[in-house]
Image: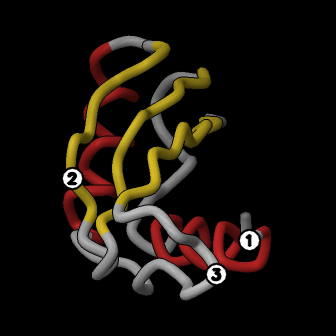
Amino acid sequence: CCPSYLASIVSQIKRNWSDRQSVKGQNTIKFVVMRDGTITGIEVDQSAGELLDISSARALRTTKQVTPLPREFTGNTLTIYLIFEYTR
């Protein structure tokens, strides 16, 4: 739908996330954005181990809400798979 919307919400989430951890890795977290921007349904799609999975999920829980879905998007929810890459 809307690449600029996706870039905006990734930016909002990454403000609550740190890529610096004691281990390197990459995981994918699935979550749902409701029409009002509320983040729900957070789950690990591809794991990088418990420490990194917890860190990624925490970033989404801390963010709680992003910009509401754009008018051009006709659905009531948007499911997103977001990759988090960690460095040491």
Q: Residue at x 52, y 28 (%)?
A: 28
* Crowd rating for badge 1 (residues with CA inside 10 Å; few <14, some 14–19, many 20+): few
- Up the image or down, 18 lies above or below 76; here it is above
Give the residue at mark 1: 2
Give the residue at mark 2: 40
Q: Earlier in the sequence, mark 1 or mark 2?
A: 1
The residue most toward the front is 74
Q: Residue at x 36, y 44 (%)?
A: 31
Q: CA distance from mark 3 to mark 2?
A: 21 Å
**Residue 24 point in image, percent of width and height:** 60, 23
In this view, the mark in front (1 or 3): 3
**Label annotation for residue 59:** none
Q: Quadrant of the C terminus?
A: top right
Side (left or right) of 7 relative to 57 = right
Q: CA distance from mark 1 to mark 2?
A: 20 Å
- SS at mark 2 in the image: strand
Query: What is the three-letter code of the residue carrying label 1?
Result: Cys
